[in-house]
Every structure is written in structure tokens, then in C-alpha cells.
Image (cartoon, rainbow, N blue to C red):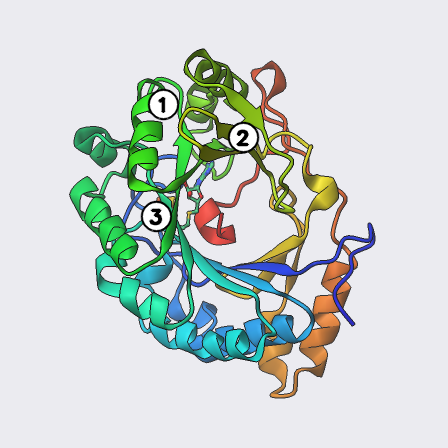
Amino acid sequence: MPLIDPFARPIDYLRVSVTDRCDFRCVYCMAENMSFLPKAELLTLEELDRMCSTFIGMGVKKLRITGGEPLVRKGIMTFFEGMTRHLHSGALNELTLTTNGSQLRKFAEDLVACGVKRVNVSLDTLDADKFAQITRWGRLAQVLDGIEAAKQAGLHIKINVVALKGFNEDELFSITDWCAAQGHDLTFIEVMPMGDLGNEDRIDQYWPLSDLRARLRERFTVTELDERSGGPARYVRLEETGQKLGFITPLTHNFCESCNRVRLTCTGELYMCLGQEDMADLRAPLRASPDNTALETAIRAAIARKPKGHDFDYSRQKVDGQMTRHMSHTGG
Ligand code: SAM
Ligand code: SF4
């Protein structure tokens, strides 16, 4: 029986964080001196395979691998190779990942060989100095080279840009033009009140996408598209270039009713909603027995607790429902 939550939403999309580690330290995501989890806490590659395979057996059709930076997890290609069998059997429709792009030169061809067709690459600026500032440890040239390698390998690329007031406002058109020229899809994301530090900075950095969209309309004819992904993205087409642009406004509630996804952390915690603290530990039932019965029962019990919606609210310069965990933990 497929996974259906209490609000009759079929849950067929699993996002899996395979590591909390990263080779960058983006200011809105991590502290510079992050402490990472001890290895024993992490699901092994074999456990990740078993966990994902169980979800796929229960009706999950789309798997997105994220982190932390998924491509810095040692041996991660073994995991991707393992998931290929579910693509071949037809049980899984899509295997994809979200990456900062730093390791794409190394892995793009292997990913294609594993059946990956599309990647989301996070890139907030095309200016090398600003890139170094926002990622603290990243180098723009390496990421652009990774994106080029991915394109050459035949991967379809979507660029994810976190909209940051006073940081990349002035790059709205240059990033849009660059994506059009390169043939990349483009999605803008509103910054979310995640993590435990710099929260006030984040309110200062909050650049509402409504403003960004108004600015786009000054230069382009913008047509709203009906397309829905089950997630928080809304799409428009720029008539002059034919480009499709996405907007992710996680702080508005307009997508919860069609939410089809759950998130698994690298320690085996299942979060039923990005904006709620409630989670289910799936590592214990997984490790308790080589048989999957207890795990399946725990998954069904968790889905039965999936909430209707989340509680973020930026109104009146105060953050209600702020999450104390980092995106790198829940896996953006
Ligand atoms: N390391 C990979 C990457 O950067 O694409 C995957 C993990 S990262 C946590 C996933 C996405 O979350 C990235 O697009 C990143 O920009 C976004 N993200 C992280 N912290 C965020 C925040 N506070 N608000 C909005 N998006 C955030
Ligand atoms: Fe790393 Fe991605 Fe977080 Fe940046 S957003 S620190 S690349 S996990």
C-alpha cells in the first residue's frame, strides 16, 4: 500500500541527507566552526541503501540526495550505483541530487552512468569575491568548472539562488541572462530562518521574492505557469527568452496542501515537515533487526503524524516557529 498521510496526500518523494559535512560554510547555512556528528551516528552506506530501498518499496518514486554536501561523503558513488537497480526495475522514477557543485568535475560522468539526469546546483553569485564571502570556503572557478563538466556529461542543470537582500539583488539580471545563455533552469529561494546563529542577520538579509518578481516584470513579460511540483516552487516563463523560472517561498503556506515529501537526515531521523520539530527515529528500528518489518511500521507511524503545514512567520520582524536545526542537518 502506498504511503498516504492523514490529509490524503500521497508521499512519494524522499529527500535524503547523506552527510552533515560540507566543504563550504555558507553563512546562512552553517557556522564557520561547525562541529559535525561522530561517524557512528551516521547511517552507513549499506544502511542508507536499505532505508531508501524500503521507502521505494513503500511507494517513493523520487529520491533527492542532499546534505551537507552529498558528494563529499566517502564512497557515495557506491550508494548511487545501488539505487540504479530501482531505476532499472521501474520502482523509482527519478534519482537526483542537490549539490554545491564543487565535486561535479570529478563525479558528473559517474552520476550519469548511475541514471541521474538532473542536478540542482546552488550558486548565489557569479562574482568570485562575493562567492568567497557567502560560502566562506568556496571557490567560484571550481564550481563553474563543475557545472561545465556536468553539462558536458549531459546532465540537465538547475541553478538554485538564495535571494539575499543587499548581496545579490544587483545580480538578478546577470544571473538570469547567464542561465539563459547556458541553458540552465533557474530557481530563486527565499532565505529561511534555520540554524541557531545570525538570525537577526537573516532577517536583514530577507529579500522577498515578491519584490524580485516585480523587478523581473520591469524588464520581461512574465507569464505565470500552472505547473506544480508538489513542493514550494511556483513557476513563470519569461516570454523574451523562453526561460522557465522557479520561486521557492518556504515562508508562505501556499504549498503545504500539496506537500508530497518527507526528509531523512543522515542519522536516520525522518522529518515529516521542514518547518516542524516533530521527527521519527528510523535508525533504531533499522538497526534492531535485519528484517524490515519494524522499520516499515515505524515509517507508517511517522507518515500518520505528518502535519498539515508549518509555522514559519517573518511578519513584524519577528521570527515565529524558527527552527533550531540547520539545513545541512535536515537536508534542504
Ligand atoms: N550542499 C548542497 C547545496 O548547497 O546545494 C546541498 C545541501 S544545501 C543545505 C541545500 C540547499 O539549501 C541549498 O540550495 C542552500 O542554498 C539552501 N539553504 C541552506 N540554508 C538555507 C537557508 N537558511 N535558507 C534558504 N535556503 C537555504
Ligand atoms: Fe554546504 Fe550547501 Fe550548506 Fe552551503 S548550503 S554550507 S554548500 S550544505
In this orientation, does residue 197 appear? yes
Drawn side of residue 167 relative to residue 274, left or right: left
Element under label 2?
A: strand
Residue drawn at 19 percent across, 49 percent down: 145
Where residue 194 sits in the image (x, y, percent)? 50, 38
Element under label 1?
A: helix
324 and 270: which one is in front? 270
- Give the alpha-carbon distance from disc 2 to disc 3, as whole Å: 37 Å
Mark carried by residue 172:
1
Q: Which residue is mark 3?
A: 34
Drawn side of residue 239 relative to residue 72, left or right: right
Residue drawn at 63 percent across, 70 percent down: 55
Q: Which residue is mark 2?
A: 236
Q: Quadrant of residue 163?
A: top left
Which amino acid, mark 3?
Met
Nearer-N-terminus badge (1/3): 3
Which amino acid, mark 2?
Val
